[in-house]
Image (cartoon, helix red, strand yellow):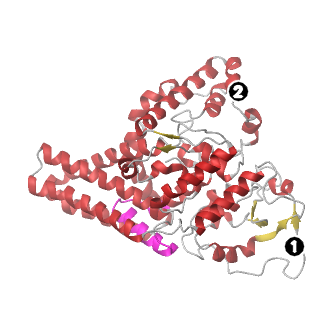
Amino acid sequence: MAPLQGPKAGMEEPEQEPGAGSSPRRFTWEEIGLRTGRGHPQQERWLVIDRKVYDISQFYRRHPGGARVISGYAGQDATDPFEAFHIDKGLVRKYMSSLQIGELALDQPSFEPTKNKLLVEDFRELHTTVERMGLLNPNHLFFFLLLLHILMLDVAGWFVLRYFGTSLVPFLISTVLLTISQSQAGFLQHDLGHLSVFSSTKWNHLVHEFVMSHLKGLSAQWWTLHHSQHHAKPNCFHKDPDIAMHPFLFALGKILSVELGMKKKKFMPYNHQHKYFFVTMPLLVVPVFQLYSLYFIFQRKLWRELAWTLTYFIRFFLFFEPLLGVTGVLGFLLLLNVLESILFTWISQLNHIPMHIDYDNNMDWFSTQLQATCNVDQSLFNDWLTGHLNFQIEHHLFPRMPRHNYWKVTPLVKSLCAKHGIEYQSKPLLTGFGDILRSLKDSGELWLDAYLHESAAAAPMEELPGIDCHEDVVHSSGGQAGSGR
């Protein structure tokens, strides 16, 4: 369900739908809900798209968008993520026909009966409105100017050192320019990875490789496979790799932190995690990305990406080694990675860490995204600094939407939230940064209380509205862990 690497990648040739000319097999949601890939019947994985039932038990490992992103919806309705992730849905449906085993029984609703029928229907109507308004169509000039300003920052960073020397002031100016260039290139590759720059999947992937691998020295395929899992099930433990630092580095969310404490598990002094956050994630994320990306490229034998990635390092050494020397250029590269890591971590985490974190409760698409994301108040500076990810809610609801259209859909999203009594969170930038630390402090204290006083710790879990915490923990215990960011 994540963006395809090519329209036919991993797919068999299209066949006639099963039962063509005869009545299709009919299934109930109870039957489908058992086919999650774990428990009984063992290893079967089914999902539903537009009332059609697909058996992905063998296919999911060959899914072009990654095995985990599609298997995360096994036993569930996947209509909305399917619509969200794919450009040419008609073509993809043709190649999925060989996987179809039947349809929902006529007396079954189009999605799980536990979901809010009116909300699901209203969101699907909103999605149709978005398409009709042309809000999924990219403005190519906008993205060309973004790329141009990234290249200009990159050249300016070298120019300052080349013509003004390597003394402190020119070095600091060059460092700032190159850090910003890397950060902005990260946001542009994010647009390309979401297929929101071109109308063609092929062109999005080709230019994505150039920006991600040549301008940043990272694997585009690794990022796409990783990031699509996050979008499919944000803040869902075992399904969102962006929260895989729980529990080995941080205790995240009220429910998971209390559960960890009640199990008497302690991998870190979580009650101090709001302090050691400063010297862990912000400093290490991008350098770790760089190392893991190279491992991924060799593991998957992505030789074209390897060639692009090598051009990044060769270009960097050719331009900066004559100015800084071998040792200096290696230190400079590490410094830029660390500085970008600090900027990236604070910007990327303020939208999610302070929000609801739990196991997958199989909620509807709209509710899943709204409970896991929040916005940062709009301004020209915030738009630019965050790569328009201050519109995180809109981005998660419509991941293929070009970022220049987020503001246009905001009133419609707010209206739908108001209609259904769902909170639409938006906050100042500095408040968002502070909320990261406040949420880490709160979850650390909940963990400590549960760790020291088990009987008193059960209360915070039971008091969380609308969630049967203990039942969900048991039901979800077999989930598949994602790889951390």
Res 292 label: none
Give, as a single range, the part of the protein colored magenta.
198-222
Of marks 2 and 1, which one's residue comes earlier in the chain?
A: 1
Q: How crowded is mark 2: few (under 14 residues within 10 Å), some or many (20 or more)?
A: few
Secondary element under disc 2, as helix, strand or loop, is helix
Whether the residues at callouts 2 and 1 have beta carbons within 8 Å, the answer is no
Please state if 353 lies on the left or on the right of 480 as rendered: left
- Residue, disc 2: 463
Q: Does the magenta stretch include residue 373?
A: no
Main SS category, magenta section: helix
- Residue, disc 1: 24
Q: Residue 51: in sight, yes or no? A: yes
Image point (56%, 45%), residue name? 373
Where residue 126 appears, as percent x and y from the top left, is 64, 59
Above or below residue 208? Residue 288 is above
Where residue 244 appears, as percent x and y from the top left, is 55, 43
Q: Distance between the residues labelled 2 and 1?
A: 45 Å
Q: Nearer the viewer, residue 248 or 82?
A: 82
Q: Nearer the viewer, mark 2 or mark 1?
A: 2
Q: Which of 137 and 300 is in front in this view?
A: 137
Q: In which quarter of the image is residue 82?
A: bottom right
Image point (48%, 33%), residue name? 435
Q: Residue 1: in sight, yes or no? A: no
Secondary element under disc 1, as helix, strand or loop, is loop
Please state if 463 lies on the left or on the right of 157 as rendered: right
Image point (72%, 66%), residue name? 58
Where residue 32 appears, as percent x and y from the top left, is 81, 57
Q: How many labels does the image show?
A: 2
Q: What amino acid type should be assigned to the residue bearing mark 2? A: Glu
